[in-house]
């Protein structure tokens, strides 16, 4: 499995009608997450460049960012994965604790009463596993100091590109936004 940081892909165009000069660095978190999910579960390469082509082809890149409601079923079908969408956080944690697969979380960012830990705006991250109530997050926007700013400091423990946090941090970060669960067929 490769960890994909979207900041490494500024040279890959990812335009849409609302973002004609978009690229993977500024709009590619969903694409990078899909690449990490596929490679983790299948052991086959699916780099962000290929993921972006599929996202465009299936219509998931028509607005700002990537619409996972469209993209999740498309890349799961293409790569032979099971998937489901849920807002049931207990289901998500049990899925991760049992090692059934990996999850793409759809964070909501800053809002009244909450400072976004994984982003100040909408952002996709991969939740790779759970050890008890602590989860391992692969954040495609990982950069030095990202979790040291006020409101984020002390909520994430970094080990390389593995960002460990209590599951409640992810739940609060997502608010009412859905989780996308992926597993092998």
Image (cartoon, helix red, strand yellow):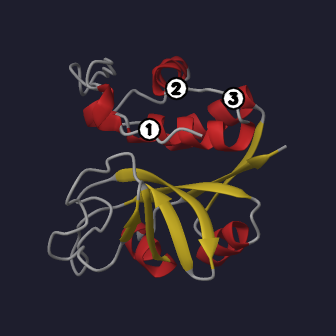
Within 10 angstroms of label 1, few (less than 14), some, or many (20 or more) residues?
many
Query: Which of the 4 image quadrants contains residue 46?
Result: top right
Q: Is residue 127 something one can see in this rendering?
A: yes
Using residue 53 as the reference point, say whether residue 101 is left or right of it: right
Kindly identify which residue carries mark 1. Answer: 4
Within 10 angstroms of label 2, few (less than 14), some, or many (20 or more) residues?
some
Residue farthest toward the left in the current orientation of the protein: 150
Alpha carbon distance from label 1 to label 3: 14 Å
Kindly identify which residue carries mark 3. Answer: 44
Q: Earlier in the sequence, mark 1 or mark 3?
A: 1
Q: Establish if 138 lies above or below 49.
A: below
Q: Establish if 125 lies above or below 10.
A: below
- Quarter of the image for the C terminus: give it: top right
For label 2, the SS is loop
Q: Residue at x 49, y 17 (%)?
A: 53
Circles 2 and 1, Cβ within 8 Å, touching? The answer is yes
Position in image of residue 173 (x %, y %):
37, 69
Q: Earlier in the sequence, mark 2 or mark 1?
A: 1
Q: Establish if 36 lies above or below 144.
A: above
Name the one closer to the observer, 62 or 161. 161
Alpha carbon distance from label 3 to label 2: 10 Å
Identify the disc placed on residue 30.
none
Query: Which of the 4 image quadrants contains residue 30?
Result: top left
Q: Is residue 70 something one can see in this rendering?
A: no
Q: Residue at x 50, y 24 (%)?
A: 59
Circles 3 and 2, Cβ within 8 Å, touching? The answer is no
Query: Which of the 4 image quadrants contains residue 100?
Result: bottom right
Kindly identify which residue carries mark 2. Answer: 47
């Amino acid at each position: 499995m490769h960890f994909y940081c979207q900041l490494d892909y500024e040279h890959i165009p990812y335009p849409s009608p609302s973002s004609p000069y978009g690229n993977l660095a500024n709009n590619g978190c969903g694409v990078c997450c899909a690449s990490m999910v596929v490679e983790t579960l299948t052991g086959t390469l699916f780099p962000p460049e290929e993921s972006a082509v599929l996202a465009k082809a299936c219509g998931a890149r028509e607005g700002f960012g990537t619409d996972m409601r469209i993209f999740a079923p498309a890349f799961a079908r293409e790569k032979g994965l099971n998937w489901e969408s849920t807002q049931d956080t207990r289901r998500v944690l049990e899925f991760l604790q049992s090692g059934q697969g990996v999850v793409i979380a759809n964070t909501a960012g800053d809002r009244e009463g909450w400072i976004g830990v994984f982003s100040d705006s909408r952002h996709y991250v991969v939740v790779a596993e759970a050890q008890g109530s602590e989860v391992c997050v692969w954040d495609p926007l990982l950069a030095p100091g990202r979790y040291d700013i006020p409101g984020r400091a002390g909520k994430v423990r970094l080990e390389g590109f593995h960002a460990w946090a209590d599951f409640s941090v992810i739940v609060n970060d997502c608010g009412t936004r859905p989780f996308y669960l992926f597993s092998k067929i």
